[in-house]
Amino acid sequence: MSFFGFDTTLPRDQGHSSNAPGFGHHDAFASLGGGAADDAAIDFEETYDGLGDQLDETDDAFNDDTFGSVPATQQTIGRDFDFAGQTSMISNTLQEEQMVYQARHPASQQQRPPIPHASKPTRTGYENYHDPDYIPQLEARADIWGLKPKQPSATRQPEPQQQGPALSRKMMSLEEVEAMMRQHPVQATPPPVPQHVAPSQPPMPSHYPQPIPHAQPSFPGMPGFPGQFQPQILQRPQQQQHHAGPSGPRQQQVHAELPGQPVHPQPPQQPQQPQQPTILQRQRQPNELAAQQQRPAQPQSQTQPQRPPSQPRHILQNPNRLSGHGQPVAHSGHAGARGPQQGHNRGPSFPGMVITHPEQLMALSQEERDAYIEAEAKRAKRNHKISLLAKDNGLMTPQDKNFITRIQLQQLVSATGNVDERGPEAAIAEDFYYHVMSQIRGGARQNPHQPANQFAQTYLFQTNSRFGPRRNGRNGDNHMQRMEQQVQRAVEAAKAKPKGKQLVIEGSLGKIAFSNAKTPRPLLNIKRPETGDKHPKNHKSSVAHRKQTLRNIEAIYMTLMRIEDVDRAVPPPIREDSSPEAIQAHMEWRSKIEALRKELWVNLKIMEPINPQSPTPHPFISILSHAKGKKAIQRIFPHIDEQERITVVTMIVVHLDQLSVVSHGTATPEEPLSPAMREEIDLFLGTVIPPLFAHVSESPLNIIIGLLGLILDRTNMHVVARSKVGMSLLTILISRAELLKQSAPEATTDWEQWADLYNRLFDAVEPVLPFVFPGTINDTEDMYIWQFLAAMGVGASPEQQQRLVIGVKDRVMETVTVSKALPADMAGARLANVNLFMRAIGLDVELLG
Amino acid sequence: MIIAYSFFKTLVDSEITVELKNEVCIRGTLKSVDQYLNIKLDNAEATDELKWPHLCSTKDMFIRGSVVRYVHLPSGAVDTALLEDATRREAESAKNKAK
């Protein structure tokens, strides 16, 4: 429709557009103006604005030219042309092509629109005219341009178009028009487009009457032509037509084809007819608005017989592109003047000047031309966008939109959880995971009142599972590092004292042989307890017991979370000048948290009486056999007092060999640990040991003595010493005692007690020494053993040190040998571990090298 | 609020693989999720493009929650301890509501 060749489609489109509100063109404009107003409550307007921002506002002025005033344009457009809407599909591509063409041939820009016509015009254009229906359309278009008065320019009346045509018919017959044109041709003699210009005029006549007025003022050269012509062609075109009337309009198109021919006079008229329609169509698209505006002015042009310079003709040709500019011309009189601005609200798209005539363009400087082309390109782009957007306009009724809006609001409310109304706590309760996670990650804090730190503490530092096993491993390392540091400190401190080093150095390696005699005995001892302990436990835990344990754990967690909730709500600390309310609040908070802590302590089941005869392990120990039970320990510790912590540590120590991680945690090179058990042990080391370690490393000697005594009295040392967990715990205790001894060396009864305990421990451990290494020599995870050995060595007497060395001599030598074959860094790590022990007893691996 | 919704919100901008009930597997960046667990994916691609070539050209997807069978998550982006607690809280609140 939109373009010259597609006349047949026009009628349908027009009908649709005028009648149906849903059409694309309407919508496009609606969105811009009236439509938007209707939807004010709806989001769409916003959406549109955003898009509008992306568009070039500078070119807005031309929009008016193109589309006319918003409300009016919709209707008018619908009737007259479908560029924005129905044609949008085609027009888009056409526009694009135009743009491309323009870009490639700046000088001939105006011609582009014609291009499609150029090929067709000769054929189709005429055909259209022959068709009776077709003429009416033209007339309708004339209305757009010149007949505005009939239709309310802004109003959306389908009729005006029809009326226009009718009028135009009445006004002039083709013959009449031709006659007029003949009169004028001389004047017109438009140099630019002699060839086809003439043909275009003929069609005009029917419409001219109204449009002419506009054109006339603008184009003095048009005198001969009846005003009717001009209006029909498009006001802009009118100018051209008037002058060039016959020849001018097609100039552009023709130019390409027949540049040199002076067709202006007569023959052109007929051919022009087809062209004109096409021109009109194009113009309408862009000029719709302009047309409306111009309409009022048209009468004037009619009356004024002006002989347009050659330019006017060009204008006609150009209208498609320049339509916006061209129209204004009519008002101003010259092509150069901007007619559109008057009627348009928006500023001119092309600041320089309105170009209606191709020659004008030629006359412009390169810069101006570029600017103009650019402006045109922007405008076309924008029109394209609008048409795209407008395609679906009007599909939803305001009710629909309101409905959607309500749904969205509802979702919004439920999504944010009415945070403001219910307070941060409620929000956290509703959306716990998200809130805590986003806070931990340091994301934007949705609620400034929320205490991110506590969450972070709880979930970053008190639980180790945050990043899965990786994290556990790291924490384990962390813990091992600290333990290593403690051992090392003990070693350093011990070395500071001149303590029988020489003896050790001399004897250590030399006495190996005779010490070996002792090794057989431990072998026998070890195997027995191992086999005896390993299996019974699993069977003990019945299903009921397991369920009860899980329930206990859940109770602990629930209490923990309540405590943490209350903790977050801690009122400001009381000061002397605190108001009674604040004090009251604080007291209430205190009592609340006290109650919860008590509840937690009860839920821990740690105070259940120990019953050695019971077939099931102690409830607290059972809790530790589950992963989540282990994880709970870390979170529990901050919420229990010192005495309770000691109780927990004691409980664990007493039942050390009953812990599954200990009783099942012994391995031999032939029978390595299962992956599941490995994982469990790592988890235990990562979650339970650290709080124990932290606690023990602050405990006084009497506590250490008590704990070590319990281990020696109540547990199977063979199992404990061969498990990673047990050995780690022993290391912690021994190294702590060693540090205490060096920092507070004054001899007390405690130290005698400690020495006794140490000797007992040494005796108990010594037989196990050859078996403490769970893996083969290639197993690199033996650092904790060297740490233990180092801790033992520091406190050992020279004689004990010799026995130590004898016990692990083979391992030392093997490790040194193996590390020679390893890459430097790995070897260094392994030797460093060994050295930890060697230096504790005053040796160094270097001596073995 | 559904815990799953709360959970998936934290995965926005991470890469997930959505397995649909029709066996189609789509990997993409989670852009948003709503309470129906409808999923919006960016940079989406079928995990087996030979099997579902018709998805090759689709880069952004909106997946209706009801057609999702599994969502494969990046384990690093999941805090299991926190998730456990969130589950406990939800269970607790559900229990309270039932009363």
Image (tube, coloured by chain):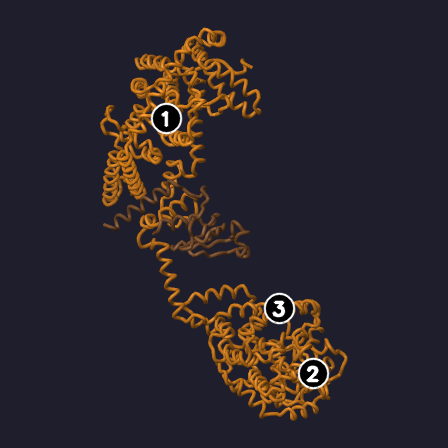
Chain colours: A orange, B brown
Q: CA distance from mark 2 to mark 1?
A: 103 Å
Q: CA distance from mark 2 to mark 3?
A: 26 Å
Q: Name above or below for residue A552 compared with residue A175.
A: above
Give the amino acid type for the residue marked by disc 3 in the picture. Answer: Glu
Give the amino acid type for the residue marked by disc 1 in the picture. Answer: His
Task: Describe residue A28's horizontal placement relative to residue A7 as left or right.
Answer: left
Task: Describe residue A352's horizontal placement relative to residue A813 as left or right.
Answer: right
Q: Name above or below for residue A188 compared with residue B73.
A: below
Asked whether the residues under marks 2 and 3 belong to the same chain, the reply is yes
Give the amino acid type for the residue marked by disc 2 in the picture. Answer: Val
**In the rendered structure, which disc, 1 or 3, sits on the residue that comes first in sequence?**
3
Q: Which residue is mark 2?
A: A197
Badge 2: residue crowd in 10 Å (few <14, some 14–19, many ≥20): many
Kind of element beneath mark 1 = loop
Q: Which residue is mark 3?
A: A96
Q: CA distance from mark 1 to mark 3?
A: 78 Å
Please, which chain is the residue tagged with disc 1 on? A
* Mark closer to the observer (1, 3): 1
Kind of element beneath mark 2 = helix
Q: Which residue is mark 1?
A: A664
State which quarter of the image contains the C terminus of chain A. top right
Kind of element beneath mark 3 = helix
Q: Looking at the image, which is closer to me, A451 or A134?
A: A134
